[in-house]
Amino acid sequence: MRVVAQRVAAARVEVDGRVSGSIGAGLLLLAGFEAADNDADLDWMAAKLARLRIFADAAGVMNRSVVDADGEVLAVSQFTLFASTRKGNRPSWSRAAPPELAQPLFERFVRRLEKTLGRAVPTGVFGAEMRVHLINDGPVTISIDSRQPE
């Protein structure tokens, strides 16, 4: 499982001109899944993201988590995080989980985030053509892979 977490002042996802999810200050999460992902990956990632200290404290130091900062979280499924550009210039998506595996993984991940954060996590629409609007804060952008925990 891979997630690109962006600290945002605000973010929203639109599908067919309608907002499917929006947040104020917090984290925009772009989440990608591969077939080998399991509940341990989802649990680890949800906990990691909830504790990730990338919000400023009173001294301006990144010392607070999204929970500490009372921030919101918006999650968007994005299979392109598993793009391989090893051969040629056209990306291969062979490592990305097929939709019938990725959608339940994404839904379970969102439920785990909600439980960990203690609040609802709005989302995009799985498999839809989405427009993601965000106001980066910082910018702070962190890439996390459950198979390469750092």
Image (spheres, rainbow, N blue to C red):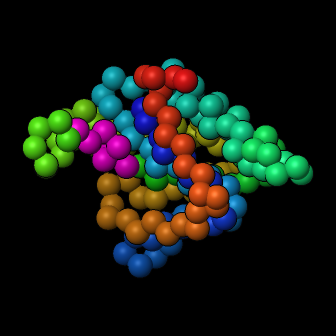
Foreground residue among 33 and 135 = 135
> Quick check: is 79 in the magenta stretch?
yes
- The residue at 45%/66% (across/down) is 132
Residue 13, can we see it? yes
- On the rendered structure, is 71 left or right of 20? right
Residue 117, can we see it? no
> Quick check: is 146 in the magenta stretch?
no
- The residue at 46%/76% (across/down) is 18
- The residue at 48%/45% (across/down) is 4
Residue lying farthest right?
Answer: 58
Foreground residue among 53 and 127 = 53
Q: Residue 83 location in percent, x, y? A: 26, 42
Residue lying farthest left?
Answer: 88
- The residue at 59%/57% (across/down) is 139
| Chain part drawn in magenta | 78-84
Q: Residue 19 location in percent, x, y? A: 50, 72
Foreground residue among 105 and 1 = 1
Q: Residue 137 location in percent, x, y? A: 64, 61
